[in-house]
Amino acid sequence: MTVAFTRRDALSESLDLAGIGIGPSNLSLACLLESVPEVRSRFFERRASFDWHPGMMMPGVELQSSFLKDLVTPVLPTSRWSFVSYLVAHKRLYAFLNANYEAVPRQEFARYLAWVANGVDGLRYGTDIRDVEHCDDRFVLRFDNGQEEAKNLVIGTGSSPFVPDWAKPFLGPDCFHNSEAKSRLNDLRAARIVVVGGGQSGGEVVEALLGDASSMKELTWISRRHNFEPINDTPFSNQVFSPEYVQAYLKLSGEQKQAALKNSILTSDGLSISTIHSIYRRLYALRYLEPSTLNASLSPNRDVIQMERNGNAYRLIVRNHFDGGIEVLHADAVVLATGYRFRLPDALGSLSERISLDRNGYPNLNDDYTMQWTGPRTNRLFAQNAGRYSHGIADSQLSLMAWRSASIVNALLGRQHFDAEPDNAQLVWATEAGSTMPHQLRAGYSDGMLSS
């Protein structure tokens, strides 16, 4: 008699896929795998429960992508784990629609993710993976109280807060990354505050600080960028958040990828228009309408080159790239909105020398999101949210999360279980096949005879 195993059966059986970390990316993958019962999968998270960026859930913060780009909808719109299903389950679909949000509150999306995390199968919380070893034809995941075996792994631990070297010696209650902003800002009693980083995270910190500026005397917001620039949220620009763009991007050389990434940076890392308006109007009110003594300085084109203690305060040496000058800032507190970086989880320490990394410290990924490593091809290491340089700027965002998960499922199965083919593109990115330059024109072009 043949016994068919499902993911819930035979706990002693080796898994087809084990997930390390339960964030939105692996949560998306777990949702899609519910429709693939022949794949035995389980996902492990050291935290006791799901919690999405709790330190950044300040009042009024918004999602920078459509709620339709949720865990499942772009590839499986009939799934019970869609954002719309969440609204219906909580009896507030019509209220949400009537609210007519231009951008969904991030707090709402976080509740949606937590609702899914409490319902989908195959998730194990409070399970800290101490080590992963490759033995024979499988990976062995070791915990404090046992182990699990799996043919394939998927890393979904997300990005870690990036702290510049000049700030690392001073981390503490009055010098911290914005990932801790919600818990730190309420108790911050500093007269002079410097916020470093001109992206959306920095804007949200500044907006929160200006909301209650009574205890501040000086607020300085510095950014490396030429200005405090808005996110490029237009239809053509948003085409970079599409499967067809990723497929075109994958065909580029390394240098071409770097150039494409640089050119599209503001489609992802710019300030939302609502945040810009809120900050500017608040500064206007503090300067002209309210009896405030706050000295607020917004300083783009700045790069911190050194930070040092100055009694109970800090002194920051800053280079002004606009005119080449050197400036000195004094602060009682420093908030680092300096972004995030992917890094391999500590549990992969015994495998790290077998994994190929690029010059940015990211794993070298194949087109199907598998890491390049020296182990057998039958044992694959998938990586979520690690392809910013290999797959394009959208890989670190929520936008293509469901499509990437579908691509991983297809790679696992060796067939197109999900339709991951791109839509009909509005923009043509790559040179179309069969589009050839006439011989005479090609010769002239190569000789430098043509000019635009």
Image (spheres, rainbow, N blue to C red):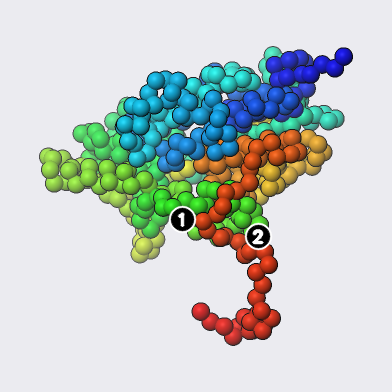
Question: Badge 1 local density, few (<14 within 10 Å), some, or many (20+)?
Answer: few
161 on left or right of 214? right
Whether residue 362 is visible, yes or no, is: no
Residue at point 64%, 25% (across, down): 34
Residue at point 66%, 79% (across, down): 438
Q: What is the quadrant of residue 107 in the picture?
A: top left
Distance from Cα at disc 1 to Cα at disc 2:
23 Å
Given residues 350 and 249, the one toward you in this image is 249
355 on left or right of 106? right
Residue at point 29%, 36% (across, down): 209
Question: Could you tell me which secondary element the residue under label 1 belongs to?
Answer: loop
Say which of marks 1 and 2 sits in front: 1
The residue under label 1 is 236
Task: Name the kind of residue labelled 2 in the image.
Answer: Ser
Residue occupying the far right of the picture: 1
Residue 402 spot, x, y in % from top left: 57, 37
Disc number at residue 227?
A: none
Residue 12 position (above or below residue 322):
above
The residue under label 2 is 253
Question: Badge 2 local density, few (<14 within 10 Å), some, or many (20+)?
Answer: few
Residue 101 spot, x, y in % from top left: 34, 36
**N-terminal-most mark, 1 or 2:** 1
